[in-house]
Image (cartoon, helix red, strand yellow):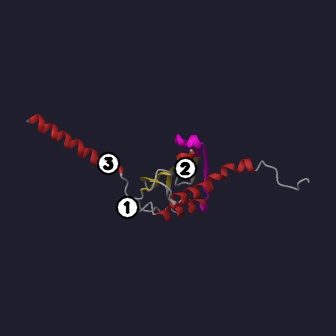
Amino acid sequence: MRSLRAAVMGAAGVVCAACALLAGCQSAPLAPPDVANSPTGGLGLLLWYAKVPTNQYQYFKLSDDGKIEFSGGMTALNRKFDWTGKVTPEQGKAIRDAVDQTGWLSAENPARDAGETPLAEIELFADGKTRRFKISGPDPEVQKVVDALQMVTNQRFQQFMQRLPEAGQQRK
């Protein structure tokens, strides 16, 4: 009888520990940061975006100091970066505005499951705290944030564009 009671108590302890662990995995809302000397107002984010059926992957990391990292394709699938840049204050504000419009910082539960793809895994950083969640299925808010990030990361092509000859008169 004692061994049965010990087993039940042990199992109850494991269940309680698992519940506490799961509760700890849920991230609470974050207060919108307001840091004047940060191009993003003190917000950082990590966004992994996958369109699995078409094998399209993008991985973005924006630090509150304006450093941005990016990769696409297999590098993004493996969650590594192959390009680093810096956002201007205007670009940082545009990204921050896009994130603020989603309500992800303060929403009780920003995670959504509206389908299998695309899939966005998002982490927001503010004031030393992190908020993690996933959004699956087509989502205009995710697309708006991805578009704002892409506007910045497209500057990686500028070195190649500057090498191209200027357009001139064409021969007939």
Three-letter code, disc 3: Leu
Residue at x 58%, y 45% (from the top left corner): 71
> Does label 3 or label 1 sit earlier along the sequence?
3
> Which residue bears the numbered disc 2?
60
Magenta stretch bounds: 71-90
User: In the picture, which quadrant includes the N terminus?
Assistant: top left
> Which residue bears the numbered disc 1?
108
Q: CA distance from mark 3 to mark 1?
A: 16 Å
Label 1 packing within 10 angstroms: few (<14), some (14-19), many (20+): few
Q: Secondary structure at mark 3?
A: helix
Q: Secondary structure at mark 1?
A: loop
**C-beta proximity under 8 Å, tags 3 and 1:** no
Expressed as whole percent of the image width and height from the top left, the position of residue 75 reads 57, 41
Q: Nearer the viewer, residue 110 or 86?
A: 110
Residue at x 86%, y 55% (from the top left corner): 168
**C-beta proximity under 8 Å, tags 2 and 1:** no
Let me know if residue 120 is in the magenta part. no
Give the label on residue 22, or none: 3
Q: CA distance from mark 3 to mark 2?
A: 27 Å
Residue at x 57%, y 46% (from the top left corner): 54
Judge from the rendering whether residue 113 lies leftward or rightward of residue 10; answer left or right.
right
Judge from the rendering whether residue 25 lies leftward or rightward of residue 69; answer left or right.
left
Label 3 packing within 10 angstroms: few (<14), some (14-19), many (20+): few
